[in-house]
Structure formats: structure tokens, C-alpha cells
């Protein structure tokens, strides 16, 4: 399999610590390593660095390369403009297809906190195995802790497979960032999981759905990908990529695909979307304070 890490954050969610020049994925929040470094270290037991691809924004490309010296330079794609996760993952999938054919591709965000790396890897490998037959686009689902409106929700349907100790369920409905009222209804029903944004699919399965649901974007990305490994690559990427539609993979593809499945996960997970969420996941002292670095308390 190949693992794609999305590292294109704009640095707004943990302002003022996170800034445009130093977005959340480059911060050291829970360990001496940045969230990006933690993400890559978490999957290095599964694949060699040559099978890890990072997609980032052009202004962060040098910082990402410095953070990840173990990756080949050609495994870092610098977007010349932000066009959402659909464009980033479409281009990454075409890159993987050129390198590996119909291999399974994993998509991870670079700025999530995972509380149990071993459990994460076991769950991910179960999803990889379930994706190999090419019938489904898979995601890992998280048990909701509150009616959050910043996550996507998955309505869990029938069990369609079992991989080791893990169940695989059909997704009956995929709703991105519902209203508070709907989120409360979802939580009360007990039938919904949060979408973690961790996706697993066979490359050809994903590209087939991409071509069907976002045909104009797909056509433009194929034109760009045709220059991979050629001297014209950077010029064509800079010229054509900014012209594609801005869309997320969640709304553009996953909500509409019809062949989405989920593996329920039990590992601790947070996308650290706010200071309040950071307070929840970091260890606190006897007074309930989270303190890092030099601090003077009153």
C-alpha cells in the first residue's frame, strides 16, 4: 500500500500559536515531535518511506521537507494553490497509480492526535484488507463523544465483512458538518459515527468514482499527472492546478459515492480543532491546567 499524508493546513485553527507560516501540523503539541512527524512515524512500521507521499501547500513545502528528511524529495507534492482535499487526493491517487498500479491507498491528515499507535495500525490494516477487493471506499469511524458540528457523520448500516477482530459496515448516509440540532439527533440515535477523515481505498476504485462524480476536475488532474517525472511537471502543475474546482473529498465524493464502508475504531482520536479540544487531550496538573514551557501562574 501507499500512504498519502495531507499537510496543507492554513494555520487558523489554533491561532495565535498556529500561523500561516507555521500551521498546526508543524507544531509540537503533545511530544517533542511535530504532529506531521508523529503522523509519519506512526505508519513507518507499515511501509518504507518510499511509499509515503505528502501533499502540502507551496509555502510550506520547504518546512515539510525539513521535518521529514527520510522521505525522497519527489514524494512531497507542493500545491501551487489550495483547492481542497478532493484535488489533493485525486492528484495523489494518480501519482500512486503511476508508481504502483491498483495498490491500496491510505489517506491521513497530518494534524490529528492518536492516543494508541498500535491500535491505530491494527485498525488501519483491517481497513486495508477490506479495501483490497475494490468494492468499497472505506473510512475509519469514531464513536461520538458530543454533538459536534465540525465533523462528518456516518450512519452505520449492516455488517458486510469481518477482518480479524474488526467489523466492516456499510455506510447508509454520509453527512458533512451537520447543524447542532441534527448532530444531537444523530448522537441520540446511537447509529452514527464521526468520520475520522482517515480513508482507505484501492486506487482504481477511487479514481473511477472521482471520474464519475467530479469529471471536470478529474480530466484536468489527469492532464497534470501526465507530466509526472518529466521536466514539464512543475510548470504544468503551477499553470493548471489553480484552475481546478475547489472541493473536499467528503462532499464531492464520499457523500455521493454510494459504495462507502466504515471500520469502527476504538483508539483515542482528536483532530485538535480548537484550544478547548487541545485542553481535553493533553495531560493536566492537579489544578486542571495544561502547562508547557516557561509558565508563571497566579
Image: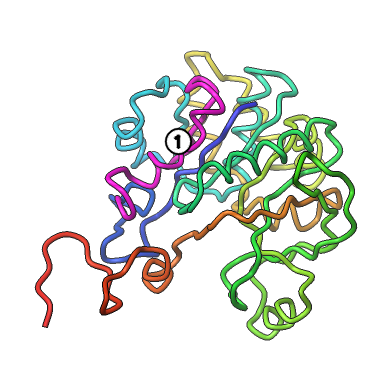
Which residue shows up at 52% across the image and 47% down it? 109
Which residue shows up at 29% across the image and 58% down it? 19
Q: Is residue 230 above or below residue 32?
A: above
Pick the front one: 99 or 293: 293
Magenta highlight range: 28-56
> Which image quadrant is residue 162 in?
top right
Which residue shows up at 75% across the image and 38% down it? 206
> Which image quadrant is residue 62 in?
top left
Residue 292 position in % (x across, y down): 21, 61
Residue 192 position in % (x across, y down): 75, 68
Along the horizontal axis of the image, is 272 left or right of 292?
right
Which residue shows up at 37% across the image and 70% down it? 279
Residue 240 position in % (x across, y down): 55, 35
Along the horizontal axis of the image, is 211 left or right of 92?
right
Q: Helix, strand or loop at disc 1?
A: helix
Residue ranking furthest to the bottom:
181
Whether 170 is among the magenta residues is: no
Image quadrant holding the N terminus, namely top right
Along the horizontal axis of the image, is 166 left or right of 47?
right
Which residue carries the number 1 mark? Answer: 40
Whether 53 is among the magenta residues is: yes
Q: Is residue 107 above or below residue 112?
A: above
Residue ranking furthest to the top:
230
> Which image quadrant is residue 128 in?
top right
Pick the front one: 257 or 151: 151
- Label count reads 1
Residue 137 position in % (x across, y down): 77, 44
Pick the front one: 46 or 250: 46
Image quadrant holding the C terminus, namely bottom left
Amino acid at each position: 500500500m501507499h500512504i498519502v499524508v495531507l499537510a496543507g493546513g492554513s494555520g487558523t485553527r489554533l491561532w495565535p500559536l498556529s500561523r500561516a507560516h507555521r500551521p498546526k501540523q508543524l507544531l509540537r503539541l503533545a511530544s517533542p515531535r511535530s504532529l506531521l512527524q508523529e503522523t509519519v512515524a506512526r505508519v513507518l512500521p507499515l511501509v518504507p518511506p518510499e511509499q509515503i507521499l505528502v501533499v502540502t501547500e507551496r509555502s510550506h513545502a520547504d518546512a515539510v521537507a525539513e521535518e521529514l528528511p527520510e522521505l525522497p524529495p519527489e514524494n512531497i507534492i507542493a500545491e501551487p494553490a489550495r483547492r481542497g482535499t478532493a484535488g489533493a487526493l485525486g492528484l495523489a491517487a494518480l501519482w500512486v497509480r503511476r508508481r504502483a498500479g491498483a495498490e491500496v491507498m491510505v489517506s491521513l491528515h497530518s494534524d490529528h492526535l492518536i492516543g494508541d499507535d498500535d491500535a491505530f495500525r491494527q485498525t488501519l490494516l483491517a481497513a486495508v484488507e477490506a479495501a483490497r477487493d475494490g468494492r468499497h471506499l472505506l473510512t475509519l469511524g469514531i464513536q461520538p463523544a458530543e454533538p459536534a458540528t465540525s465533523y462528518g457523520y456516518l450512519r452505520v448500516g449492516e455488517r458486510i465483512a469481518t477482518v480479524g477482530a474488526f467489523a466492516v459496515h456499510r455506510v447508509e448516509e454520509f453527512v458533512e458538518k451537520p447543524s447542532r440540532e441534527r448532530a444531537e439527533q444523530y448522537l441520540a440515535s446511537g447509529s452514527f459515527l464521526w468520520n475520522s477523515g482517515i480513508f482507505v481505498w484501492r486506487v482504481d476504485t477511487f479514481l473511477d468514482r472521482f471520474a464519475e462524480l467530479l469529471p471536470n476536475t478529474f480530466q484536468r488532474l489527469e492532464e497534470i499527472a501526465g507530466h509526472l517525472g518529466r521536466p514539464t511537471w512543475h510548470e504544468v502543475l503551477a499553470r493548471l492546478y489553480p484552475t481546478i474546482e475547489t472541493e473536499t473529498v467528503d462532499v464531492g465524493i464520499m457523500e455521493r459515492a454510494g459504495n462507502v464502508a466504515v471500520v469502527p475504531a476504538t483508539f483515542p482520536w482528536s483532530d485538535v480543532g480548537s484550544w478547548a479540544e487541545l485542553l481535553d487531550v493533553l495531560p493536566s496538573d492537579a489544578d486542571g491546567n495544561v502547562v508547557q514551557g516557561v509558565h508563571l501562574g497566579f
